[in-house]
Amino acid sequence: MQTSPSSAQSKHRALIIGGSLAGLFTGNMLRSIGWNVDIYERSRHDLDSRGGGIVLQPDVVEVFRRSVASLAGGELGVASRYRTVLRPDGTVQSKQFAPQVQTSWSLIYTTLKQAFGEAHYHCGKVLARVEQNAGARTVTAFFDDGSSETGDLLIGADGGNSTVRAQIWPQEQPSYAGYLAWRGLVPEDEMPPVARETLRGDFGFANNRGSHILGYLVPGLDNDLRPGHRLYNWVWYRVASDDEIAGIMTDRDGRQRGYAIPEGLLARKWIAHLGREARALLPPAFREIVEATAEPFAQAIRDLASDNMVAGRVIILGDAAAIPRPHTAASTSKAAANALALAEELERSPDDIEAALARWEPAQVRYGKFLKRQGVETGEYLLFHRVHALSQA
Ligand SMILES: Cc1cc2nc3c(=O)[nH]c(=O)nc-3n(C[C@H](O)[C@H](O)[C@H](O)COP(=O)(O)OP(=O)(O)OC[C@H]3O[C@@H](n4cnc5c(N)ncnc54)[C@H](O)[C@@H]3O)c2cc1C
């Protein structure tokens, strides 16, 4: 169902580059305050659901509440009750009551996309460059098919390798953190016996040298929340050198994929490698779950927290501006928080976009840096057993 644009006479137009979560949070929020919004996404088709689990955070729920009318009263994820830490031999190191809700990338994406609708979501549009017209206070996006669009505000929601950021702040680049996340999804009804007995229903963890794994249940295919139809989502952090990362990110067809390799494309030799590592490092429940995963995928951990998010009528948000490490469970909620704050500031001074952006930027930059520090501190401790000085983060 499409949210109702609040006014036909809306005078402002936003061009959003990138139609993943940050683009859709922002598109729905700006529309809810009466802006005309167009989203330009480079992919030619719907983004696929290679994604796994996401801890559901309040900012995401808040965007849904304000802009996704169809969701009223709907359930957004799978609840877990305990946080259970296992030793390498499988015995329980700790079990703490800590209820929370886990959802999936796909549930958030499909819900936001349905709310935004198709009419102003343009697929197969690859931004090449942006140009500002300071006098007219407009900005123009030029696409690689030769077309262009002009609006009052251009929002770079184009992810960690943002074209918008590269053009305006080329010095701001993500850096590799020295480890990666192996990831996987196993249908709940195919969980092997020890995994089913030990892990189902809780948020599970296990640590070893240079190894930190966690897992939980998430919605299943077509956002199915019924017991037995959900997916077990696991994320296994492992230290990897630059050379190892280059090897892992070379897909089954020999193509170099940079920093993420989707489900179905990981080279077979790495699936065998994962099985060997699981037998050496993981407690039985997690070992079983890794071995039961048909198509593991992987993502290198990178750090970014841009000093700038606004230049005239161009802004960046979501991963384009800051990539917190996943231990913070915050990259999706940060994108939502960026969008909520932007809509609030634009609504506060609808006829003074510059003033709204000047109020918006400092807190968003600070938030990105705070999450970077938090993620670095946690990751360095978990993977390298280093207590990291906050000033170095
Ligand atoms: C398919 C997919 C699956 C994911 N799964 C998970 C998950 O399971 N768990 C998790 O925590 N995070 C996942 N993420 C990442 C998560 O979406 C982000 O970390 C976070 O939500 C912020 O997203 P973002 O929209 O800023 O960046 P991204 O999700 O990276 O989106 C950026 C978008 O911009 C588009 N784009 C890039 N360059 C251009 C250009 N020049 N012109 C037009 N469009 C462009 C990309 O195609 C992409 O759709 C996934 C991302 C994708 C794309």
Image (tube, grey):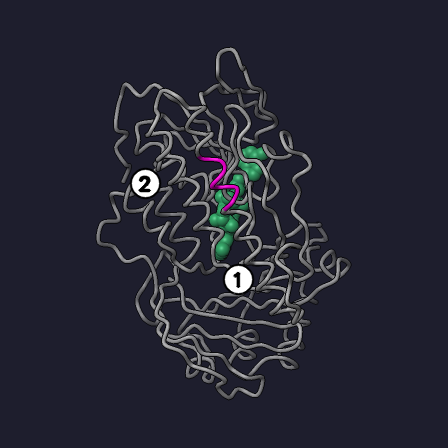
Q: Position of residue 62 (x, y in %)?
A: 32, 48
Residue drawn 34% across and 24% down? 350
Callout 1 environment at 10 Å: few (<14), some (14 to 19), or many (20+)? Answer: some
Q: Is mark 2 within 8 Å of ligand 1?
A: no
- Whether residue 347 sits left or right of residue 72 in the image: it is right
Tell me if residue 226 comes above or below residue 111 in the rendering. Answer: below
Element type at mark 1: helix
Q: Position of residue 207 (x, y in %)?
A: 58, 76
Callout 2 environment at 10 Å: few (<14), some (14 to 19), or many (20+)? Answer: many
Tell me if residue 76 comes above or below residue 288 in the rendering. Answer: above
The answer for how far apart the CA atoms under marks 1 and 2 are is 29 Å
Q: Nearer the viewer, residue 87 or 229?
A: 87
Tell me the magenta residue range: 360-366
Magenta stretch contains residue 344: no
Secondary structure that dominates the magenta span: helix
Q: Is mark 1 within 8 Å of ligand 1?
A: no
| Residue assigned mark 1 | 327
Residue sticking out furthest to the left: 73
Which of the 4 quarters of the picture holds residue 145? Answer: top right
Tell me if residue 340 comes above or below residue 314 in the rendering. Answer: below
Magenta stretch contains residue 363: yes
- Whether residue 223 sits left or right of residue 15 in the image: it is left
Q: Amino acid at mark 1?
A: His
User: The N terminus appears in which quarter of the rendering?
Assistant: top left
How many discs mark residues in the rendered view? 2
Q: Amino acid at mark 2?
A: Ala
Q: Nearer the viewer, residue 240 or 48?
A: 240
Q: Position of residue 39 (x, y in %)?
A: 44, 32
Residue drawn 47% across and 53% down? 49
Q: Position of residue 219 (x, y in %)?
A: 37, 62
| Residue assigned mark 2 | 115
Residue drawn 32% across and 71% down? 227
